[in-house]
Amino acid sequence: MASTANANKEQYKRIKTILVSQPKPERSPYYELEKKYDLTIDWRPFIHVEGLTPKEFRGQRVRPENFSAIIFTSKNAIDHFFRICDGLRIRMAGDTKYFCSSEAVANYLQKFIIYRKRKVFAGQRKVSELKNYFNKFKDSDKFLLPCSNLGAKGTVKFLKEIEIDFQEALMYRTVSSDLSDLSDITYDVLVFFSPLGIKSLYDNFPDFKQNETRIAAFGNSTKQAVEERGLILNIQAPAPEVPSMTSALKLYLEKSNK
């Protein structure tokens, strides 16, 4: 990915192009910025999810049907859990309990099970909100936590704290996407939302130089990944005055494109 000159020298040089390291949404406040400031905003996921094959999963010596309760922290976890089960010709028992981190995750579960025949528990935003239910069933049930190569640190910590008998099961991986077609393309701003996005940038372009490119990062862990690579962080969110990435970009654009 090409760039030219030093970001510090012309920090607020006019912005014409932005690359957002996420899939393109149907509706987004980014489109309002694009129109207001006459920008070209492209969308490209820097990372993607790959499922383990049934053969790879078997190597863990975990049998989902031996667990009476399943913990889901994302829609990806649901997709790959049932994909693995189908691949191994496993049918979960009708009385299996499902603990979901949110209502959205629980609703997605309906693609795979019939609610009235099973027990589903949902938090508002995280699994730890189901503490009372975990305590109710901790002595009678054995829990399985489908996860990715990134794990589920917060959930694991919570389950250990309340002494739940559980086992993690790797079912999918989050990996860097192929961005080789961008090798000769320059953007004024690159927008990142996770450390994995930064990792993907360097997996694809090991010799990447920031030069005039402005870097925007959402979240402290992403900020840290930017700084660890020796990059200059030009735009950061959230902050008190800019709770979202679009509001942070707007504040910057008010200075760069005035």
Image: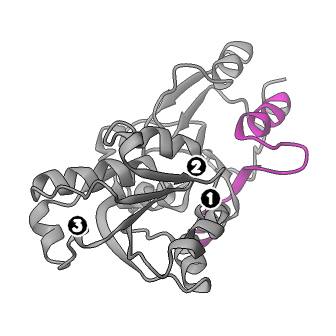
Residue 116 lies in the magenta stretch? no
Q: Quadrant of residue 220?
A: bottom right
| Residue identifier under label 2 | 102
Give the image location of residue 25, x and y in percent.
52, 26
Of residues 155 and 143, the one nearer the viewer is 143
Q: Residue at x 49, y 69 (%)?
A: 152
Mark 2 vs mark 1, CA separation in Å: 6 Å
Magenta range: 226-254
Left/right placement of residue 223 relative to residue 53 reads right
Q: Residues within 10 Å of mark 3 (few under 14, many from 20)?
A: some
Read off the residue under disc 1: 126
Answer yes or no: do the residues labelled 3 and 1 have beta carbons within 8 Å?
no
Q: Are marks 2 and 1 in contact (CB under 8 Å)?
A: yes
Q: Which residue is at the front of the view, 117 or 212? A: 117
Query: CA gap, disc 3 to disc 1?
Result: 25 Å
**Quick check: can you spot residue 113?**
yes
Quadrant of the image occupied by residue 169: bottom left
- Total numbered badges shown on the rendered structure: 3
Residue drawn at the location 22% of the way across and 66% of the way down: 65
Q: CA distance from mark 2 to mark 3?
A: 23 Å
Dot label at residue 65: 3
Circle 3: residue type: Glu
Mark 3 or mark 1: name the one nearer the start of the chain.
3
Identify which residue is drawn at 58% across, 49% down.
Answer: 102
Q: Earlier in the sequence, mark 2 or mark 1?
A: 2
Q: Where does the image place residue 238, in percent across and percent down from the top left?
A: 78, 50
The quarter holding residue 213 reads: top right
Position in image of residue 235 (x %, y %): 74, 47
Which amino acid, by three-letter code, is at mark 2? Ser
Mark 1 surroundings within 10 Å by alpha-carbon count, few (fewer than 14), some (14 through 19), many (20 or more): some
